[in-house]
Image (cartoon, rainbow, N blue to C red):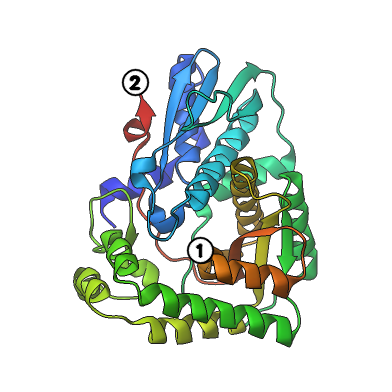
Amino acid sequence: MAEQASEPWRVTERVFPTSGSAEEQLRFLLGYAILAPSSHNTQPWHFRIGESRVDLIADRSRGLSVVDPDDRELIISCGAALYNLRLALRCFGFQDTVEPFPDHNEPDLLARVRIAPGGVASAEEQALLAAIPRRRTNRAAFAERPVPPILLDALADAAAAERAWFHVVTGQRERAAVAALIAEGDRLQWADPAFRRELASWMRADWTTRGDGMPGTGFGIGEIESLVAPVLIRTFDMGRGRAAKDQELALGSPVLAVLGTDADTPEAHLEAGQAIARVLLRAAVDDVSASFLNQPNEIPALRTRLRETLGHPGWPQMLVRLGYESPGPHTPRRPVADVVLQ
């Protein structure tokens, strides 16, 4: 990854502008928010700094019209950035009060974070903050090492703290059924030329200077392959091969889990984003990585079947697998200056 695109990952509390202005301090804390995960690494967020507040605004120009036509995953991605911001605020001595969707006349305004002095972070929150620059999405196979049940309980607690639930897929029959839905989702999506064009548009060469998208290293392909990958993706339906690989990953990962919410509203999607961010950071504290196999949630008919398979009354929002790995490279990020509205 080019130096420019990797620089945001070097954020460190040691250079917090203690004597700086309120705006300088908030811009620094947004350096943690922009490290949140997002679908296709689109980073579909803007921020607006006001008097004792930060507004989170959806950048719908970065939406995925094919895979996410209702902007459900876009709002989840923004919710993940919101959680990182809330966490950073508390860890640097601020209180935060979140008003979701505070203005019906501004539908892209997803949340307003009111800020006041006097925040105190717990030891766990400090550990979560330290994990932000360490968290990575890993699309390769995980090591054959079980994730301890005590950590799975902690992940469920992390989701519940943000008004979501965390369902670990257990038993061979349930896992096989979920893995089959993932494979079916791959075949259906890759058969659609519009899906392939959209995916290809977010693929990046490994040495990209762009601050978004998915470099080839994230898919385990080399530098030369990363150059030609967009052309191959646009041209060929590789759904069968992708389905076989993802099904194998789902069956072989130490943990396969679904994060969901009781409702399926924009407010619930924002909560799901905060929950998945907290879950992934709690996993990263213990050096557990994750990646998404969200295909069944992106096709309405398959999402219905996933609900039936889980037997859970709520709505599945994110399907993740977790395990241990050797740390790989980060995906690129746009700098804070590019996402703050003037």
Which residue is painted at 69% across and 19% down in the image?
118
Q: SS class of the residue under badge 2?
A: loop
- Could you tell me residue 218's position as x and y percent? 38, 67
Specify whether residue 138 is in view: yes
The residue that mark 1 highlights is: 298
| Residue 339 percent across, percent down from the top left | 36, 34
Q: Residue at x 65, y 54 (%)?
A: 279
Taking depth in this image into account, of 25 and 52 the one nearest to the observer is: 52
Quarter of the image that includes the N terminus: bottom left
Q: Could one spot residue 143 in this view of the protein?
A: no
| 1 or 2: tag closer to the N-terminus | 1
Q: In x, y percent, where is residue 160? A: 76, 50
Q: Assess disc 2: are there few (<14), some (14-19) or many (≥20) residues with their C-alpha within 10 Å of its C-alpha.
A: few
Residue of label 2 = 342
196 to the left or right of 77: left
Front-lying residue, 171 or 189: 189
Q: Amino acid at mark 1?
A: Glu
336 in relation to 301, above or below: above
> Horizontal and vertical percent for residue 227?
19, 69
Dot 1, crowdedness within 10 Å: few (<14), some or many (≥20)? some
Q: Amino acid at mark 2?
A: Gln
59 vs 71, left or right, is left
